[in-house]
């Protein structure tokens, strides 16, 4: 399925003809170091904001914004306070919408 606003061809579960939109919860986006993995796009972060327990990363994808929310502990302990080269939209977390 092609996500026109994000500029990516996504691998999804089987898609019916009445699906017009695709979405993903901001907490379900994952980091990736490998651009060859399905549903991966460059992590072009344009802004990072803080909330009490999370980091909100705003990713530029094809001139549109994609929000990625991660816990501050994940940002510090897993990502070592560095952005990954890519982000992945796991197909099991994609929401196919009419």
Image: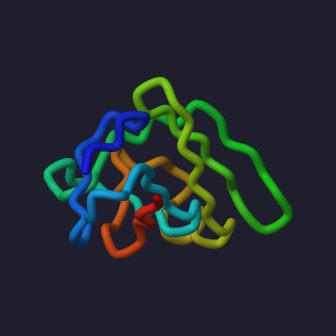
Q: Position of residue 24 (x, y in %)?
A: 49, 61
Q: Residue furthest right?
A: 52
Residue 47 lies left or right of residue 4; in this view the side is right
Q: Residue at x 51, y 30 (%)?
A: 64
Where does residue 44 sit, x and y in percent of width and height? 45, 34
Q: How is the image coloured?
A: rainbow
Residue at the extreme top: 63
Residue at the far left: name it. Answer: 36
Residue drawn at the location 28% of the way across and 51% of the way down: 40
Q: Residue furthest bottom?
A: 92
- From this view, report whether residue 92 is shown above or below residue 40: below
Point 74% across, 45% down: residue? 49
Report the label total: 0
Image coordinates of residue 46 in percent, x first then y, are: 58, 31
Q: Residue at x 37, y 57 (%)?
A: 19
Q: Nearer the viewer, residue 33 or 59?
A: 59
Q: Nearer the viewer, residue 41 or 3?
A: 3
**Residue 14 left/right relative to 92:** left
Foreground residue among 49 and 14:
14
In the figure, residue 34 lies in which quadrant?
bottom left
Tell me the quarter of the picture where residue 53 sits: bottom right
Instruction: Name the spot of residue 16 as percent of width and height, x first.
Output: 27, 64
Residue 54's place in the image compared with 39, above or below, is below
Q: Is residue 80 left or right of residue 49?
A: left
């Amino acid at each position: 399925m092609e996500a026109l606003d994000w500029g990516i061809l996504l691998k999804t579960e089987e898609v019916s003809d009445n699906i017009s939109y695709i979405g993903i919860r901001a907490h379900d986006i994952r980091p990736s170091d490998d651009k060859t993995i399905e549903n991966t796009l460059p992590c072009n972060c344009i802004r990072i904001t803080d909330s009490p327990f999370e980091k909100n990363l705003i990713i530029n994808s094809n001139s549109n914004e994609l929000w990625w929310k991660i816990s501050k502990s994940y940002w510090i302990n897993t990502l070592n306070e560095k952005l990954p080269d890519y982000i992945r939209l796991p197909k099991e977390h994609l929401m196919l919408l009419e």
